[in-house]
Image: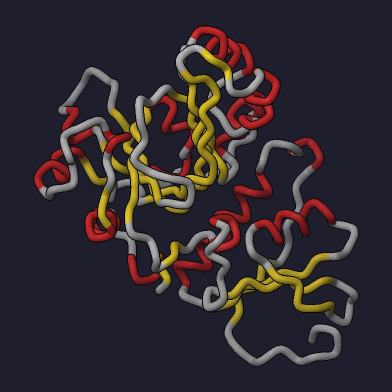
Amino acid sequence: MANGIVLPKTARLKITTIKIDERYRNQRIGEGALGLTLWQWRDLGINEIYVTVFDKHISLILLLEKYGFIHVGNNLNGERVYIKDRRNLDFSDPCKSFPFLSGQVQHAGCLAIDMEYHDTMFASSDLANTLQERVDISVANGLKKVYIGKPYSLAFKVGEPVLVYRKYTGTGGRPGYKSVITTYCVATRIEKIKVNGRAQYSYDQFLRMVGNKSVYNEDELKEKYDTWASLTLIELLYYGYFGAGNNVNWMWLKSNDCWPGTHPMNFRYTRSQFEKILREGKVDVGNVIIN
């Protein structure tokens, strides 16, 4: 019951308790735990998920609202009742529609990340499914990730899906089978921090944009800011992963018209190619892209 109104009877997944120990504050574990729960909700195929929370838990309320939960009233215990419904998603905001993609998607891009950075940023992509406790890898816990690079150009825009290509940099084995697409994200922010040696943002502004969403520490970020003539920040929302055994390798991409032959950042996949790659990664496309 919410504000005396009985909600329509239907199957709903309930989030029971979200409590983060004080020593793990600011490590983005709450965001990561919510992400794991929403992935499970998606895979169960249930339309609604809900949670109850007291007014005093302000940070949790803000997190829930950020990820598309709607306050529908209070229960008899005085707790707020928040519901998210896959039939009523706000696709204007990738966080609110997470983990579902809009049926209006027409294109997708690609981002190549060296394996040592990839494996920290996208810890769940090899079915690790564990939240990291070290502060220096809090990037692994949260759903928002920041990529720092110096691309000449980008083929994707804010709001579009981005496939993440794990570039194998080891020396053993056959790279064509070890370099793989593991993950799909949505670009939520793209900022040119420096262009041809000219700063568009101050270092402090840059640092605030990065926050704790990057694999780099402050010394490394400062070095890049000071020495790179061009510097671009790309913020990604971690929408899903294929998992061990399902990752899509370079050989398959090349053999199936999904490797355009330029740098991956210049790939502009069609909706058909994007869906083909998702299916090869064993993603239930009809349960992820909502028409």
Residue 194 place in picture, x, y as percent: 52, 20
Vertical comparison of 45 with 54: above or below: below
Q: Is residue 166 shown left or right of residue 205?
A: left
Count of numbered tags: 0
Please give the name of the residue rendered at 46% of the width and 49% of the height, measured from the top-left corner: 186
- Which of the 4 quarters of the picture holds residue 9? bottom right
Quadrant in the picture for the N terminus = bottom right
Please give the name of the residue rendered at 58% of the width and 55% of the height, measured from the top-left corner: 95
Vertical comparison of 90 with 163: above or below: below
Residue 7 place in picture, x, y as percent: 71, 89
Q: Is residue 155 shown left or right of residue 75?
A: left
Q: 118 or 258: nearer the eye?
A: 258
Q: Is residue 131 shown left or right of residue 181?
A: right
Please give the name of the residue rendered at 51% of the width and 28% of the height, measured from the top-left corner: 192
Vertical comparison of 180 with 64: above or below: above
Residue 179 place in picture, x, y as percent: 25, 33
Please give the name of the residue rendered at 12% of the width and 50% of the height, measured from the top-left corner: 256
Quadrant in the picture for the C terminus = bottom left
Residue that extends furthest to the left in the rendered view of this protein: 255
Q: Is residue 86 shown left or right of residue 50?
A: left
